Image (cartoon, helix red, strand yellow):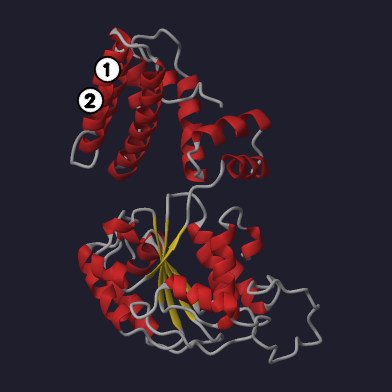
Amino acid sequence: MTFTRISGHEKTIRRLRSLVETGRVPPAMIFHGPAGIGKFPAALAFAAALNCTRVPFVEKTSPPPQEESLDTLFAASEAAPPAPQTAEVPAAQPVVPAQSGDSCGLCNSCLQAKSGAHPDIRIVDTAFQAALLNEDESANLKIDTVRELTRWTQQKPMLSPWKVFIIRDAEALVPQAQNALLKTLEAPPANTVLILTAARKNALLSTILSRCCPVEFGPLSRSVVGALLLAQGAAPDEAQRLAALARGSLEKAAEAGGIIARLAKLRAGDPSRAFKFAAGLPRDSHLAREEVKTLLELALANIRIAWSAAEAGPAKNRYTALLRRTLELRRMADRNVSYMQLLEITLLESERAGLKLEELLGTEVFN
């Protein structure tokens, strides 16, 4: 994975590359922003660039993040001249024009990073945890996983100048695991970088956030989402439709595609459509909750559109009441409730207010 393969986020990527060039790398960073916009690929690209054998290693000179802001680090790194080349490329390897601050993608280190086999780049997520603890995959990251991570941080790099640990979806860390992680963040080993990715950084302890340099990733533009969907094989009309529903996220585009596919299977005019649609929720409670929350957010956005377009009178009053009710249901989605019933109530009350399922969920909005 190289930075050149990441679409969007040009300013952020440019700054990350400048950190690689100068070696002013914070020991802990949090890549935060909406889900499905490229935070994790950016973390992988950053790790690969740090350990690429064609990127000169610069001894880290940055102070702890609590002593110097990331904006200051970025400004200093952008002002600093490129690091001098200290080693020649081995003659046995083809010479590839290197992008400043990016990985080459062809050296042994880059190939190992691409295959997920680099011994100095470790990804910590729920799938890794399941293999580590020999148990089924769960929605949370546990303290035992963080303890193992802490043990690894104390070891020296095996092949590369940097050890990089990427905690994917760090909001999945339970409070005990977050407290255990603090010990490493307070005294990070030399040439060790911890990168947390999070769609909801406020789910992390304030003490965690205070010790991580924040790197914000915003939603992708509609044109970028559309281009990425086309590259994945979507038809032009489908890519345009999903990009309009994606709210800047490839993950949301995939969810919208699933919604459209499920609606297409339901016969228009069927009085039980709402129940049949709700019955298609995932059985896993965590996945069901996330899908319902996405559907409710999508519904809120389209109810607001309908409310804005309605003239003063009974229709606008119905949309006002529906908006308030849907906001209440959205708050309930964070509690221990029946997500199927929550979705059924939302769909039925919307139909009573005069919004079809397609209008409520935005599947007729292409512009």
Mark 2 neighbour density, 10 Å: few (under 14) some (14–19) many (20 or more)? some
Which label number is shown at residue 325? 2
| Image spot of residue 202 (x, y percent) | 29, 57
Seen in the image, is 179 located left or right of residue 359? left
In the image, 6 versus 223, the foreground residue is 223
User: Where is residue 50, by image quadrant?
Assistant: bottom right
User: Where is residue 177, by image quadrant?
Assistant: bottom left
| Image spot of residue 336 (x, y percent) | 18, 41
Mark 1 neighbour density, 10 Å: few (under 14) some (14–19) many (20 or more)? some
In the image, 119 versus 68, the foreground residue is 68
Counting residues from the start of the chain, the first of labels 1 and 2 encountered is: 2
Residues at marks 1 and 2, CA–CA distance in whole angstroms:
9 Å
Check if mark 1's residue and mark 2's residue have beta carbons within 8 Å: yes
Which label number is shown at residue 349? 1
Q: Which residue corresponds to the image point at 23% horizontal and 25% vertical from the top-left?
A: 325
- Above or below, 350 against 338 in this view is above
Q: Which residue corresponds to the image point at 31% horizontal and 21% vertical from the top-left?
A: 347
- Above or below, 244 against 184 in this view is above
Which label number is shown at residue 212? none
Viewer-nearest of labels 1 and 2?
Answer: 2
Seen in the image, is 347 located left or right of residue 116? left
| Image spot of residue 357 (x, y percent) | 40, 19
Seen in the image, is 136 located left or right of residue 56? left
Going by the numbered disc 1, the residue's amino acid type is: Glu
Secondary structure state at the residue bearing disc 2: helix
Q: Evaluate whether residue 117 shows in this view.
A: no
Secondary structure state at the residue bearing disc 1: helix
